[in-house]
Image (spheres, rainbow, N blue to C red):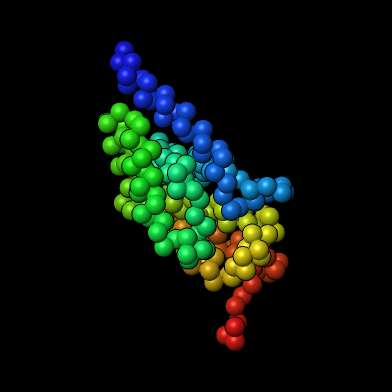
Amino acid sequence: MDLNRLDQQIRFVLELDKLKYVLRQNYLIGQDRQENTAEHCWHLAIMALLLAEYADSKINLGRVLELILIHDLVEIYAGDTYCYDEDQTVDQEEREAQAADRLFALLPMDQSTRLHELRNEFEEGSSMEARFAASLDRLLPLLMNHYSQGRLWKEHAITADQVLTRNRHIQAGSQSLWSFAQSIIEDSISKGYLTVKSDHD
């Protein structure tokens, strides 16, 4: 056994505990607190297991799970970036790339390289697995916002057009889930969770 290698891996595992303290914008359904990123990743992994049949083409579920579990680890150092905050998203790519370099450097070189490859695959959408994983990553917050009666959307005055634009990428991984997402958005509008910006606004 390579004890130095094991020591690096255990240090990385312990560092991941910090993901539980990274609060995201979304509120838990029926609760008065925000979810953390570790909860988000777990929830996405379960979604992938259940909804894999809706991918537009055959996918490797194991790889989807890898992508889901890896892509948000950078939030340990970069924090969560609210997708509708234009100021925060300006340097998001740079902040998260730097965070990946810092975090993955804790691992042995072969595993560090592997995690970088997975993260880049997700960010670039360079495989069907990455596009499906990204579809789920958009769908889950949409569901949580809808079933929280649009609380976060209302707090930030988010419009239906913004939500449609943000979530349109779901169709790159699943037309079925995009159709479902559109129905959720329409229902959110009808229930007053989302506002429709008029031509006079």
Foreground of the two, 174 or 67: 67
> Residue at left 51%, top 63%?
85
Foreground of the two, 23 or 145: 23
Most distant residue in the bottom direction: 200
Location of residue 194 in the rendering, given as x and y in whole percent from the top left corner: 64, 68
Q: Is residue 101 left or right of residue 133?
A: left
Q: Is residue 19 left or right of residue 195?
A: left
Foreground of the two, 186 or 196: 196
Q: Is residue 103 left or right of residue 30?
A: left
Quadrant showing the N terminus: top left
From where the camera sits, is residue 186 visible? no
Quarter of image, res 161:
bottom right
> Residue at left 68%, top 55%?
148
From where the camera sits, is residue 89 visible? yes
Location of residue 79 in the rendering, given as x and y in whole percent from the top left corner: 49, 48
Location of residue 199 in the rendering, given as x and y in whole percent from the top left corner: 57, 85
Location of residue 27 in the rendering, given as x and y in whole percent from the top left corner: 65, 51
